[in-house]
Amino acid sequence: KVQALEEDLSKQRTAVSDAEKERDELQANVRSLESVQTELEASQRVVKELGSKVQALEEDLSKQRTAVSDAEKERDELQANVRSLESVQAGLEASQRVVKELGSKVQALEEDLSKQRTAVSDAEKERDELQANVRAAEQSHEEKVRSLESVQAGLEASQRVVKELGSKVQALEE
């Protein structure tokens, strides 16, 4: 019986040693997860900053659209004036210069608006990619935590068994 208990004790010691190695690996994984958590937090800050930039770009885009709309209205009004002033040659020439200048302004505003749209689109894509990275990191973190909890439970069970065997061996030795 003592020999069988000693063999069981030896097996339990091996199991505890294995569990301690696994615990050490898990602790290394925890440190790795903490590093991932730090990266995740940095990514979240970047996403937040990008969100602010996107919002600012959207506000600029809205202002650009208003400016374009205002310019288009002004252009339309001037074109109406040009049609009504066709009978007066001097007035027509002056109106044509104004319309040409406004057309250039409208074109410049439209080009700026196109650039703004591209910048907003790029920022949205980058934000989406970062959000996907954050979700993947969070999922990986949760899976590793669940794995750590399972190993911890196994380690605690092994420690209880070793403690019980130690008590039995001590009782046998007495």
Image (cartoon, rainbow, N blue to C red):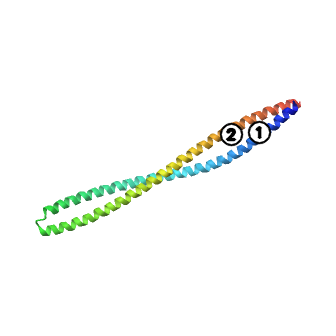
Residue type indicated by callout 1: Ala
Residue position for label 2 = 151
Residue 4 position, x and y percent, is 85, 32
Label 1 element class: helix
* Residue drawn where x is 30% and y is 63% of the image: 107
Q: Nearer the viewer, residue 10 or 53?
A: 10
Could you give the CA–CA distance between mark 1 and mark 2, rounded to whole angstroms?
A: 13 Å
Quadrant containing the C terminus is top right
* Residue drawn where x is 68% and y is 48% of the image: 28
Residue 6 position, x and y percent, is 85, 35
Q: Is residue 162 left or right of residue 136?
A: right
* Residue drawn where x is 38% and y is 56% of the image: 117
Looking at the image, the residue that sits furthest to the left is 87
Residue position for label 1 = 15
Can you say whether 118 is above or below 14 in the image? below
Q: Is residue 50 left or right of residue 166?
A: left
Residue 97 picture quarter: bottom left
